[in-house]
Structures are given as C-alpha cells and as structure tokens.
Image: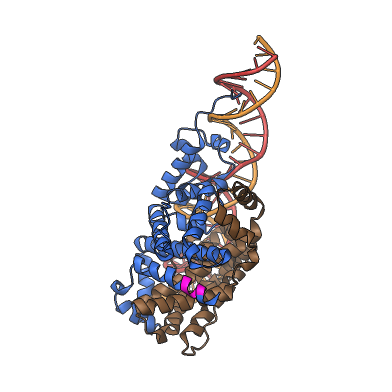
Chain colours: A blue, B brown, C orange, D red
Amino acid sequence: MPRGRPPVHNREQVLSAAVRLADADGLDAVTMRRVASEIGAGAMSLYTYVPDREHLIDEMVDRVAGELPLPALTGDWRADATALVVAQREMMLRHPWLPGAVTRRPVAGVNLLGFLEHGLGALEPSGLSGGTRMALLAMFTGFVASYVAAEHAGDVTGEEQAARIGAAVASGGFPRLAAALAEGGGTAPDFARIAGWVVSGLVREAAANS
Amino acid sequence: MPRGRPPVHNREQVLSAAVRLADADGLDAVTMRRVASEIGAGAMSLYTYVPDREHLIDEMVDRVAGELPLPALTGDWRADATALVVAQREMMLRHPWLPGAVTRRPVAGVNLLGFLEHGLGALEPSGLSGGTRMALLAMFTGFVASYVAAEHAGDVTGEEQAARIGAAVASGGFPRLAAALAEGGGTAPDFARIAGWVVSGLVREAAANS
DNA sequence: CCCTTTTTCGTACGGTGTACTGAAAAGCGT
DNA sequence: ACGCTTTTCAGTACACCGTACGAAAAAGGG
C-alpha cells in the first residue's frame, strides 16, 4: 500500500556504509557523494533517508552506541560501572572517529538513551541522586573519549610531535616533563587500572561530599 | 638584513584573526579565505606563515593555551590541581571551539608543554610517579573538555533533542532516566564541586593503588 | 488511462583547501 | 647603477564539498 515509487535503498544501508567509510578513512571521508556511491546510489538520493550530513553523523553515533553490551546488572555498582567503561573503550577503539564525533554536539538517540538508562541503573546501589549519577556518566564518557583519542593519536602522529617534544626537553626548560618522560612510557598505568580509579574514586568522592 | 621582500603581516596577526573568527562563529568559520580577508591579505599569503589549515588550528590551540594562568605552586596538590582545572574550564568557556579542537589530534606546542610542566609540579607532592601524573593530567583535560562541551551544547540545541528525550521518557521505556530528569536539573552538582571530586578522587585512588 | 505520491538523481551554485605561477620588493656583489 | 638572489604577495585554477532545484521514473488508486 505504499503509494509512490518504491525505494531501492534504506536508512540501514546508508548508515552502515557511512560507518564503514568512517572506520576506514576517518570522519572527513564521510561525504555524501562517497557514501552514496558506496551503496550504488546518486548523491542526492541520500536525502531521502537523512536530512543532511550533520544528522547523518548523529545517527552514525547512535548506531554504533547500539553495539554497547548492556549486561544484566549484578548490584555491585563498581563492577557494573567499570564494565560499562571498558565496553565504551572497546567501542571507541573499534570506531576511531567516535571520540571526535561525540564532542561535536550532544546526540539523544535511542541507543544513547539506553546507555544512560543502563548506567543510571548500574550506579543506583551507590545511593547517589539521579542528577549526580548523570553527571558521573557524562564524566565517564568524556574520560574514555579523551583516553582513546590519545591512544589513536599515538599511532598516527609520532614523528612531528616527537621532534618538538624532544627539542623542548633538550632545552632544559621543562625539567619535570623531562623526568617523567625519562622514566619510560612503560610506567604509565594501563586502562583497566585507570578505569578502576575513575569509577571508584569519583563515586566514593561524590558519595562523601553530596 | 633579511634578504627578500619584507613581509607585511606576521604569524601573530594570522593566529589572532583565526581565534577571533573561531570565537565568534565556530571552528568551521576559520577558512583560509576568511582569515586572510580579516587581516587584509590574499588567501594564499597565509601559507607564508602557516603550512596548512590543520597546523593553523594546532597553533590556535597552543596560542589560547598560553592564556592559562600558571600561578606559583603552593605545595598543596589538591588546591593547585583544582585551580588548574578551574582555569582550564574558564579558557574553554572563553573559546567554545576548544573542546572540539583538542579531541582532533594531540598538539605539543610550547604553551601546552608549559601546562604539562606546571601540572606535573602541582601533583608532585602527591608522591605519584611521573607517568601516573601525566595520565591524570590528560584525564583532567578530557573531563573539562567534555563538561564544557555539554555546557555549550545545552545552550545551542534544546529544541530538537528535548523533543526526542521527552518522547522517550513518555514511552515509559526509560524509568530511571525519567526519574532522574523528574528530580529537576537543579540537583546536578555545579562545576566547582565536581572538579573537587575529580581531583581528590582520582589522586587518592591512584595513590592507594599504585 | 490519468492523477497523485514518492523516490531517484543530473545539473548547478557557491564555497572549500591548496598547487602553481609569476610579479613585486627588498638587500647584496660588482 | 645594475643585475642577482631571496622572499613575500596574490591571482588563477582544480578538484571536491553540501545541497537547492527540478525533471524523470515508478508505483497504486480512481
């Protein structure tokens, strides 16, 4: 009973092609023409399924947010919240463009609301208020995004930045930075440990001072 | 004794024009042509002072990082670190494009290295290792960026997202989210309080588990 | 059969970063 | 005084971008 000319594509194809492009070549590679040609459509046909490029990216974010596992809660807020943070990191490692995309502007898709709902539940046993738990969840996400962005950047840059840092250190003007780097990068704590600090430290502190 | 034709502009003018544009109209408004016309130059003349647009943005980031006050350390790591975080927020409120720019890729300009040096010194009395202190500083920055991004976004969006959130809440599928929102936004803690949690909580936790 | 509705997509416009090119303007060696 | 070298300035051009517009295509309902 649909009246008009039947669509040959659908939103699903558009979004997964866009995500595939972003995963491979970064967010800048997600142009209307390239996404369209990826699914064998004309560039303007995309506008049937998506209002404009901005909303396309919004929906990409919400789509990959749907990959987050939301396992049944155990009642142990520390374990549940840490698992959530770890899952967020894996998602962002899988989609290197995500840290840059979430900072653009807030998205309120179904999957992201589902994430919020799950996180609020995970932190419920801590006894904190809803507003405080929301703020903590936002902090968790921001922390993971900045951590993963640094992880990816380490792989990419290296050359140019390393030279500048080396020169600055050699200049003697940054003694503490020089000392920290001389310790060797190996002493930097790994993600699981840091994630534990974030969750435990923030929740405990919030509980003590709310 | 410079040999060639004397330059009529300089990097300083380019950078401050670019920052002015970004402050007023966002990072997307920083185009080579607009920056150039802002200082009365031809578009291509900018390439005398800056290798390309990407590096221009890098230098913008480092330039505003120079606005950060780095007061003499008091020896109280909690107070010093909290002051640094508060100053970071003020910088990002002054330059709304910053949260989005720092997540793009890491920059190692002089002012940012100075910030690192200062932060390492502020956390020195905590007794943590250099690598751990570096990781904590990165987390602080990520936290502030995500917090301020949310602050700015709240002013901008409102309409479209609010409708979707309202519909989701009304659907009954997100009971905890609905409850948290029903509490009223006023119960969300303010920045100073949260900043204290972040600094104290993370440092304490790191010290206990390193 | 036509009419309405919907999707498809070619064309076109104004904008972008920047490669290329040559002209302009200074100091230096003679 | 006069090239020569060196550096900056900026016009032109190219490929690419998002997307407004409009016409063609393809279906169902009368």
Q: Nearer the viewer, residue B99 or A4?
A: A4
Q: Nearer the viewer, residue B134 or C11?
A: B134
Residue A149 image-quadrant placement = bottom left
Q: Looking at the rendering, in which quadrant would you find the C terminus of chain A?
A: bottom right
Residue A148 image-quadrant placement = bottom left
Q: Position of residue B180 (x, y in %)?
A: 59, 60
Q: Position of residue A52 (x, y in %)?
A: 58, 44
How many discs appear?
0
- Is B112 placed left or right of A52 in the picture? left
Q: Looking at the rendering, in which quadrant would you find the N terminus of chain A?
A: top right
Q: Position of residue B136 (x, y in %)?
A: 42, 74
* Image vertical order of residue A180 relative to residue A72, above or below: below
Is there any visible trace of residue A210 in the rendered image? Answer: yes
Q: Main SS of the magenta segment?
A: helix
Is there any visible trace of residue B41 in the rendered image? Answer: no
Q: Residue at x 45, y 49 (%)?
A: A64
